[in-house]
Image (spheres, rainbow, N blue to C red):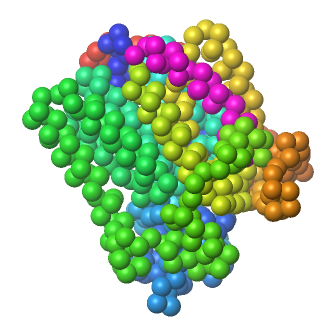
């Protein structure tokens, strides 16, 4: 992708690699954790690769892969999840099978290692690539390596992308894919010499986001419209080829989803959520469209500013993203401002219309995670005062995101108190309702941390986490000191 600053200098590749390495260290250092959601996705990967079937009959009650997140049709069980993570994780699992074979006699250990491999391939690495892309976008917007590195750190460590990039959910992957579609369209608007290739990449990324997280469908459509507007000024022949390329590449993951639905659920347009096996979930998904109804005002508050699940309460650095929309508008990125606001509004409306709007056992508003990288883009446009405030908010955000990352974003958090409060009082208390500080901090103080690669290798926990923090900070600092490369330059050495 041709990424340059407004002054024509290219984004230094070494800096991009440093940011990518920092995000990879932060995400890959924590093995995938056990959970129904994760196991449902893992079971589909294992069934497809090991048994050449889409049914998870062998795995849904097996130790290490048991799950209640499943669908049932004609007496057979299937994953009820979108298949994007399975599409991304299956090749890595297939390659790792010879190494995993030694653990086949212990299903739990085999599943644990398999879950980590699939999580890395389908979630952690795509999320890290999204952070590197955020750095490139910020560099292009502000032309300042130090601030571009800070913006990348905002997305990588100051938002729920960090904890959710370490578990086998689709939210972090979808965030990177949506940003990829946005970045490709913006590069076309900036006059990239490769509009057809960029359009193809955008089409593939947006379609893949949809088959990874269904709620991103409206956002992907919005970004698709943005792509079409980016192509309008081009010569008709070039724009036509770009549209065809985007449609052709985007059709591939959509075709895979339709084929899966037909094979598993009897119709290309029948999703797993229409065949839920667990009775506790049937009523939830029977309402509205796949369980989503009209958004409620109180839920909008709880999903944004309330400490129980509020995105801006838990990741306050995103407030700086909102503040950056005005200077972004004044800099001429007006269409981009509309797209980012539209994406946030769509995902917020969908989450606020879902009965289990809090996302079950989790620390935060996980259904909003696909928008967090887009929401960080405006931070690049802040002035001196705004940057100082943003850095303070970033420090607070990193602390709040580190806690669920270290203890596990799902395993240490119980949604029963929240559900009970809603059932009894119809509302949530503002004091004492933060899952990060009530449950996560208590688990952290008690030493109930999740496993890390360091502890699995026998290193003392504090030594490994300290080395990890220094390494990640050092890589971001290296990216902050990068110099511009003139157009056409290549790094030496």
Quarter of the figure with the N terminus: top left
Across and down, in percent, residue 325 comes to 53, 22
In-image side of 407 versus 488 (left or right): right
In-image side of 61 versus 75 (left or right): right
Magenta-drawn stretch contains 328:
yes
Name above or below for residue 99 compared with residue 161: below
The structure residue drawn at horizontal position 78% and vertical position 41%, both measured from the top left corner, is 307
Magenta-drawn stretch contains 468:
no
In-image side of 264 versus 396 (left or right): left
* Front residue of 279 and 263: 279
Residue 24 visible to the viewer = yes
Task: Give the main secondary structure of the magenta stretch.
Answer: helix
Name above or below for residue 111 compared with residue 237: below
> Which stretch appears magenta?
309-332
> On the image, which quarter does residue 358 sit in?
bottom right
How many circles with numbers are drawn on the protein? 0
Across and down, in percent, residue 352 comes to 62, 51
* Front residue of 411 and 491: 411
The structure residue drawn at horizontal position 18% and vertical position 46%, both measured from the top left corner, is 244
Across and down, in percent, residue 120 comes to 53, 53
Name above or below for residue 303 compared with residue 132: below
Residue 471 visible to the viewer = no
Across and down, in percent, residue 191 comes to 25, 22
* Front residue of 108 and 8: 8
Farthest bottom residue? 75
The structure residue drawn at horizontal position 60% and vertical position 21%, both measured from the top left corner, is 323
Quarter of the figure with the C terminus: top left
């Amino acid at each position: 992708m041709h990424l340059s600053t407004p002054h024509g200098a290219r984004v230094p590749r070494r800096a991009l690699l440093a940011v990518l390495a920092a995000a990879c260290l932060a995400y890959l250092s924590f093995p995938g954790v056990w959970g129904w959601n994760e196991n449902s996705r893992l079971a589909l990967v294992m069934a497809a690769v090991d048994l050449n079937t889409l049914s998870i009959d062998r795995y849904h009650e097996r130790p290490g892969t048991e799950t209640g997140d499943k669908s049932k049709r004609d007496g057979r069980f299937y994953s009820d999840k979108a298949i994007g993570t399975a599409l991304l994780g299956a090749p890595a699992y297939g390659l790792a099978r010879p190494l995993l074979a030694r653990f086949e006699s212990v299903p739990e250990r085999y599943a644990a290692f398999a879950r980590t491999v699939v999580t890395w391939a389908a979630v952690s690495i795509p999320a890290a690539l999204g952070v590197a892309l955020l750095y490139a976008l910020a560099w292009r917007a502000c032309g300042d390596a130090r601030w571009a590195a800070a913006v990348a750190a905002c997305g990588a460590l100051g938002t729920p992308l960090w904890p959710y990039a370490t578990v086998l959910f689709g939210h972090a992957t979808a965030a990177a894919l949506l940003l990829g579609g946005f970045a490709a369209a913006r590069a076309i608007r900036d006059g990239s010499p490769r509009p057809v290739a960029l359009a193809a990449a955008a089409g593939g990324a947006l379609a893949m986001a949809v088959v990874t997280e269904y709620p991103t469908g409206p956002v992907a459509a919005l970004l698709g419209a943005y792509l079409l507007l980016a192509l309008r000024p081009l010569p008709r022949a070039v724009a036509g080829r770009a549209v065809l390329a985007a449609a052709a590449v985007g059709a591939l993951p959509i075709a895979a989803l339709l084929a899966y639905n037909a094979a598993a659920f009897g119709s290309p347009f029948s999703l797993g959520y229409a065949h839920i096996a667990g009775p506790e979930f049937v009523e939830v998904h029977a309402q509205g469209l796949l369980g989503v109804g009209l958004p409620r005002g109180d839920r909008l508050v709880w999903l944004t500013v309330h400490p129980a699940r509020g995105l801006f309460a838990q990741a306050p650095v995103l407030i700086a993203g909102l503040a950056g929309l005005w200077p972004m508008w004044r800099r001429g990125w007006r269409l981009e401002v509309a797209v980012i606001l539209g994406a946030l509004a769509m995902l917020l409306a969908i989450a606020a219309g879902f009965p289990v709007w809090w996302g079950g056992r989790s620390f935060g508003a996980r259904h909003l995670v696909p928008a967090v990288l887009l929401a960080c883009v405006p931070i690049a446009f802040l002035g001196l005062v705004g940057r100082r405030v943003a850095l303070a908010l970033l420090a607070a955000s990193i602390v709040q995101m580190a806690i669920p990352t270290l203890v596990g974003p799902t395993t240490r958090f119980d949604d029963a108190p929240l559900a009970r409060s809603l059932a009894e009082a119809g509302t949530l208390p503002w004091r004492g309702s933060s899952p990060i500080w009530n449950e996560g901090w208590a688990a952290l103080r008690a030493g109930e941390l999740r496993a890390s690669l360091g502890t699995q290798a026998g290193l003392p926990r504090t030594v490994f986490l300290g080395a990890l923090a220094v390494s990640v900070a050092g890589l971001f600092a290296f990216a902050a000191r990068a110099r511009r490369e003139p157009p056409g330059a290549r790094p030496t050495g």
